[in-house]
Amino acid sequence: MSNLVRRETREPTRQNANDYRWDPLRVMDAFLRWDPFRSEGNLLSRGGEYIPHFDVKENKNAYVLTADLPGVKDEDVDVSLNGNLLTVSGKREDERREDGEQYYSVERSHGTFSRSFSLPDGVDGGAISADLKSGVLTVQIPKRPESQPRKITLGKSNGSGVTNEKTGTAKA
């Protein structure tokens, strides 16, 4: 019994209480990324593989993709659109190693990456912009004006629910 170590259980610090909820999509993402041959100490390990993580958010006018790509040059990133499939791909180069240098640990990953996103209807594919500043890639995918929500004013109608915009009278 002397091998048992008692550790204090501490709640992880989170900014938002909603971060504690179980998210099946996050679990599925982790499951799909799991590779049993990549675990530490495994002889079949492929070594450093570079997999950037993306944040995807929606605001009033656009969808925004953000990814940390430290050490990746502008010319090594490709953002392309094919139909409604947006693909972000690129590569992160390995550092040159000089003769006579001895590494005790190599933990930073490098290699090629590719990530695809299915875009919803109503985006303006011709106005997509991408920018890489200080190692952060930001892709702006604007919404078409006709697909953005618009306020419908309540008016008096004769039961049909549709009013004539010019006269304000109900259509039959």
Image (cartoon, rainbow, N blue to C red):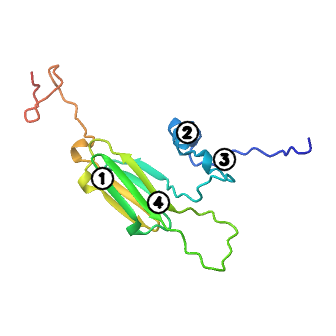
Compare marks 1 and 2 and give the one earlier in the sequence: 2
Give the residue number, with chain letter if any, for mark 2: 27
Residues tagged 3 and 1 counted as in contact (Cβ below 8 A): no
Q: Out of 106 and 5, give the one closest to the viewer.
A: 106
Q: CA distance from mark 4 to mark 3?
A: 33 Å
Going by the numbered disc 3, the residue's amino acid type is Pro
Compare marks 4 and 3 and give the one earlier in the sequence: 3
Q: Which mark is residue 49?
A: none
Give the residue number, with chain letter if any, for mark 4: 112
List x then y, in percent, for residue 28.
52, 38
Label 4: few (<14), some or many (≥20) within 10 Å? Answer: some
Give the residue number, with chain letter if any, for mark 3: 12
Q: Which mark lies nearer to you, 4 or 2? A: 4
Compare marks 3 and 2 and give the one earlier in the sequence: 3
Q: Which mark lies nearer to you, 3 or 2? A: 2
Residues tagged 3 and 2 counted as in contact (Cβ below 8 A): no
Circle 2: element type: helix
Image side of residue 62 versus residue 55, left or right: left
Q: Out of 37 and 128, give the one closest to the viewer.
A: 37
Circle 4: element type: strand
Give the residue number, with chain letter if any, for mark 1: 81
Q: Which mark lies nearer to you, 3 or 1? A: 1
Residues tagged 1 and 2 counted as in contact (Cβ below 8 A): no
Q: CA distance from mark 3 to mark 1?
A: 39 Å
Residue appearing at x 79%, y 45% in the figure: 8
List x then y, in percent, for residue 64.
38, 52
Q: Out of 11 and 80, give the one closest to the viewer.
A: 80
Q: Which mark lies nearer to you, 4 or 3? A: 4
